[in-house]
Image: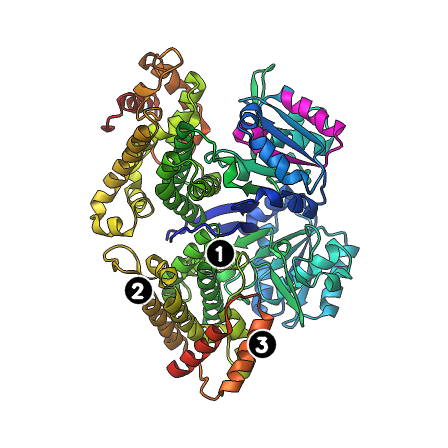
Amino acid sequence: MELPGYYEFSSRVRIIAGYRTLERIPAVLRASGARRPMIITDKGVAAAGLLRTVVEAVSGDCEVGAVTDDVPADSDLRVVNALSRLYTDGRCDSLIAVGGGSVMDTAKGVNILVSERAPDLMVFSGAGTLKRPLKPLIAVPTTAGTGSEVTLVAIVKDHERRQKMAFVSYFLLPAAAVIDPRMTLSLPAAITAATGMDALAHAVEAYYGLQKNPLSDVHATTAIRLISGNLLRAVLVPTDTEARLSMAIAATMAGLAFSNSMVGMVHTLGHAVGAVCGVPHGVCMAVLLPYGLEYNRRRRDREMAELLLPMAGEEVYASTPPHQRTDRVIAYIRQINEDLHQATGGAHPRCFREILDREGRPAVPTRIFGEIAEAALDDGSLFYNPEDMDYDDFLAVLEAAWEGRALVI
Amino acid sequence: MEMVMPPPEEFFCPTKVLAGKRAIEALPFELAGLGVGKPLLLFGSSPLDRFRLKIVEGALGESGLVYGVCGPVPTDVDLPIVREVAINYLENGHDALVAVGGGTVVQTAKLVNIAVTGRPEDLARCVGEDNIPGPLNTLAVISTLGGTGYESTNYVSLGDRRYRSGRLMPDLMIIDPRMMKGTERGEGAAVVVTALTQAVEAALAGANPFVVPYTEAAIRFIFERLPLWLAEPKDGTSALALANACHYAGCAYSNVVSGSVHSLGRQLAPVVGGEAGAIMSCLLPRYLACVAANDPARVASLWPYLCGSEDYIPPSVPERAGGAVFAMEEFLRKVRVTMGWDGLSLTALNDERRETIVDAALREGYGVWDREMGLRILTDTAKEG
């Protein structure tokens, strides 16, 4: 195992994973001195019946002060302000966030306002501005992808000023992340596939990135083993609670890996494609992940070869000559995408050409590759990518990803 | 390792680790991020401890951090010492503890933290498991390659009082190569074998997937680096890797139910004499063999860490389990030879005495291992010894 000259690793969130773990939330709140939570979610989660499941699981043992499903797809300062008032009116003393990244970010933003009793969230933006613990926040993820239940970051958009505010502090970490397979049982096949590939991208990029460290490495490989063994099954048999739980755990582990070692060009380009074209993040990750390996293998071939072990198992690893292992890893990822494409009836794309908008037109048309490449240049995640990239490099990857062909460097 | 989903599992490791060159210099920034303004540094009583304190103070020198210093902490911790440090902490308005080194320094710091966060009588009220009612004040540890092996754990003792709570785990673990210099081979080897025991017991305790990364990293580093460090104690990279491994093992161990080797080792130490690490080096292979006899798949999962995956992987689970046991036996045999540790002589213990030891270990530990396994471990160890 490699030991870098210096590294940091933190995973301070209490993680409770397993069947019927939602029912443990009141005890966790009581241990933090709280009894009257506000539950925050979005309309999609509520419509799927998951909000009702959470309310039923906790309300027998604590009094829910307020419930809201008003969180939009993108976190919004106006919503944060409104929910803070709801929290205060409900005389709440804690928060339960049920959902994905936007719900988590919104809940963290609300937590800042209600804990600091401040009118303006903006003054707390940046890193290290919070100086004391906030109210207890319980994170209940409903996708198995982002890992935002274990990160110390929140992003909230101020639509009036057209600014994104980032908040970074250990005090933003949830008191607990509760991973209950009931929360992902109803996740549609295509979203299961895409969010699973998001988790895989987190783990893979964390493993070969510049800021890798021993603990992020083992979290990444453990996540990859779980994903390899359970993603396809979760798509094919959505009621398989073991596969669902394994994927949720893998996503959290991958979240721990990448939040400590950062990510790279797969996310750089993925963020840009998402911002310019509105394509879901997990879909971008799935399409771009093979190119992250192809582009960076000159510098990271050894690390990438090691990924064959958690991906394909010990027999395949030991029987594959070392110089062929990276090729097999890349082929394996493409095969996962192919399998997911088949398993979702074509809904999971294998390349950008297969991503269509509601009118059936390409959602990532080649004519805007330049705009995407420009947007990618400003993304901070590129800093941790092993190889440098410029505008032309981004274009080359996008063109290869359009067709789904191998990248020729 | 096969991921079987057991009943609900919890994992808690609040410790942020900062490891490597000039890690100590990061301490003021990290403390500020936790809202700390005036920590109290504790140090130990040996000349090496004082030297290490000088290193730390030198590293903090230009940071502007306002701090106090208290010590030396003696090699045996008792209530008067804890009271003395707690009074210093409260009277001087400190808001965090920084333990410089391991062993009794960390032990004292954990106990003082209970007393100063709440009330002094909490030391009596909080005895046992999960009895600390709320978060404790910030605790940072500047680690060495030594101590007891429990510095990173959720455990501390004061005489007969035992405390176990995630709230006891340090908030910060600083692992700086400057603090590894001067470590005696015996002390280092003993704590690393303790860490190996913690990691293996944690790995075999169940299937909590969040423990797996920590056990894997600890076992790999120990297998790769302990022979190198024993051959050349000035090998700073290996010392640093082993200190990291000790931290990982402590984190893993804090998230499982305590195992048989630890409990037996503690009961045996006063009876047979010798370092706990040396005793564990004899018990651990027998423990592994016992588990393999009942559940070979569990031990087989250790194969990649102990034997590597590069060239050949035995196709069957029993072969892998046997290979893992053999690898562990050989590894620890070589450690004992290098260190001049005698084999554990248990032949003088009759059946009744062994049963007494096993029963005491069962009562003392939090383990769910069974009595028959404990007896078998001692019997098999006696045969080997």
Q: Is residue A87 magenta?
A: yes
Mark 1 or mark 3, earlier in chain: 1
Say yes or no: labels 1 and 3 on the same chain: yes
x, y percent for residue A201: 39, 35
Regarding residue A152, the answer to whether it shows in the image is: no
**Residue identifier under label 1:** B248
C-alpha span from label 2 to label 3: 33 Å
Amino acid found under the numbered disc labelled 3? Ala
Answer left or right for B76 relative to A264. Answer: right
Q: What's the magenta region?
A: A79-105
Q: Give whichever of A400, B374 is nearer the camera.
A: B374
Which chain letter matches label 2?
B
Regarding residue B376, the answer to whether it shows in the image is: yes
Q: Give whichever of B237, B65 is nearer the camera.
A: B237
Which of labels 2 and 1 is toward the front?
2
Which chain letter matches label 3?
B
**Residue identifier under label 2:** B318
Amino acid found under the numbered disc labelled 2? Pro
Residue at 78% x, 57% y: name it.
Answer: B119
Q: Say if A124 sits above or below B232 in the image.
A: above
Q: Are marks 2 and 3 in contact (CB under 8 Å)?
A: no
Answer left or right for B2 relative to B65. Answer: left
x, y percent for residue B29: 60, 43
Answer left or right for A288 relative to A136. Answer: left
C-alpha span from label 2 to label 1: 28 Å
Q: Say if B174 sits above or below A75 in the image.
A: below
Q: Say if A225 sits above or below A355 in the image.
A: below
